[in-house]
Image: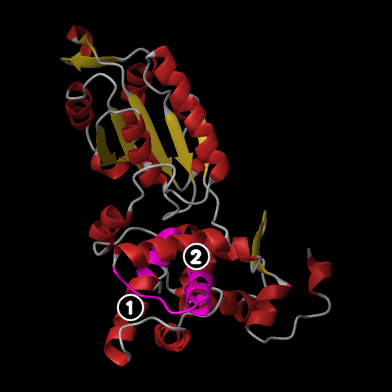
């Protein structure tokens, strides 16, 4: 159901794009000012004490810059960064291999840290607290524990689902920061910077504003839309992005001025027409939309909640007045009395 254009998770085509456009420093990283200020203090204090930075947990929706921040932290600390993800660490041996190959001061970045299995988490506890790795040799009564010392390192975890991280693991992070959706002005600056790097010419502020408005307040989506509008302007125009080619490209992609695509509007329509505006449970909504529940919670819901199009209640999801207005459906007069 979801489109690859406004999909906030990284796609194969984004890997080269992200590495090319990734800001190398806090100065070039636009937005998230509070988080940046806190990280600068954390890093500067660690440098003065000649220590590794405390373990850091970065929370927020996909595409907001968590991986970029991890790379900037590593660069600011003049240390290497090793990148992996929760699903990629399937066995304790996988984790042991990663940890024993770290050098003093290295940054270990684990994306989707909430998807680590319980056995891996329990192995991480002593590694994060005491910088030791406990390896169990043998089974049953003859089993014994071998303890290996690890170099002092920094674990940076990134998650889109903070609630799925167990309390013991969450408590071992010394600093937790939440990344919010970006302001319009920050997205415009990001697009302008990316256009300059990609050698793409944008004519006029209106074209820039239109792309930013349709970017779901997310840098990754903004960069992806910039590429698609660039493609359209090169094929149907003179290669220069202007307001006309931008609007035509977005219309062809079926993305409106709010950054909503047909899948988002269909989800809202299902809540309103099939479930009378809600409340509706996640599984029922997923079945009605023929979509995975995780896709609804990770891709569609965060932005629809940010726009105020839906609300989540203990009884389920409900459509707000804004959703009815967007779809040009009359809002029932007695709807408010139901909640």
Residue under pointer 1:
230
Task: From the viewer's perspective, tell me whether residue 78 is left or right of residue 177.
Answer: left
Task: From the viewer's perspective, tell me whether residue 266 is left or right of residue 115.
Answer: right
Local SS, label 1: helix
Using the rendered image of the protein, determine whether residue 22 is visible from the camera's viewpoint: yes
Q: Which mark is residue 171?
A: none
Image quadrant where residue 117 sits:
top left
Q: Which residues are magenta?
A: 199-224
Q: Residue 187, how many percent across, how many down?
A: 50, 62
Residue at image coords 20%, 29%: 98
Query: What is the quadrant of the N terminus in the image?
Result: bottom left
Q: Nearer the viewer, residue 327 or 123?
A: 327
Q: Residue 296, how many percent across, how many down?
A: 48, 63
The magenta stretch spans residue 221:
yes
Residue under pointer 2:
188
The magenta stretch spans residue 251:
no
């Amino acid at each position: 159901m979801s489109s690859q254009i406004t999909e906030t998770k990284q796609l194969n085509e984004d890997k080269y794009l992200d590495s090319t456009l990734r800001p190398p420093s806090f100065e070039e990283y636009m937005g998230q000012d509070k988080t940046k200020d806190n990280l600068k203090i954390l890093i500067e204090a660690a440098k003065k004490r000649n220590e590794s930075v405390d373990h850091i947990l970065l929370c927020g929706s996909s595409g907001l810059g968590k991986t970029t921040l991890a790379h900037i932290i590593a660069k600011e600390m003049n240390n290497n960064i090793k990148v992996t993800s929760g699903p990629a660490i399937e066995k304790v041996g996988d984790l042991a291999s990663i940890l024993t190959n770290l050098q003093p001061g290295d940054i270990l970045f684990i994306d989707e840290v909430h998807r680590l299995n319980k056995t891996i988490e329990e192995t991480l506890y002593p590694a994060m607290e005491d910088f030791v790795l406990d390896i169990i040799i043998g089974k049953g009564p003859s089993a014994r524990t071998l303890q290996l010392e690890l170099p002092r390192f920094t674990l940076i975890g990134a998650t889109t689902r903070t609630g799925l991280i167990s309390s013991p693991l969450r408590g071992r992070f010394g600093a937790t920061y939440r990344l919010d959706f970006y302001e319009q002005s920050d997205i415009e600056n990001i697009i302008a910077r990316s256009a300059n790097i990609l050698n793409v010419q944008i004519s006029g502020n209106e074209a820039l504003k239109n792309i930013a408005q349709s970017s779901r307040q997310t840098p990754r989506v903004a960069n992806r839309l910039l590429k698609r509008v660039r493609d359209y302007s090169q094929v149907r125009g003179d290669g220069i992005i202007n307001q006309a080619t931008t609007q035509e490209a977005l219309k062809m992609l079926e993305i409106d001025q709010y950054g909503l695509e047909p899948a988002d509007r269909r989800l809202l329509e299902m809540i309103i027409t099939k479930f009378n505006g809600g409340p509706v449970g996640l599984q029922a909504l997923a079945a009605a939309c023929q979509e995975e529940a995780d896709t609804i919670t990770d891709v569609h819901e965060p932005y629809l909640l940010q726009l105020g199009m839906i609300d989540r209640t203990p009884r389920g999801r409900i459509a707000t007045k804004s959703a009815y207005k967007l779809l040009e459906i009359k809002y029932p007069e007695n709807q408010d009395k139901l909640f």
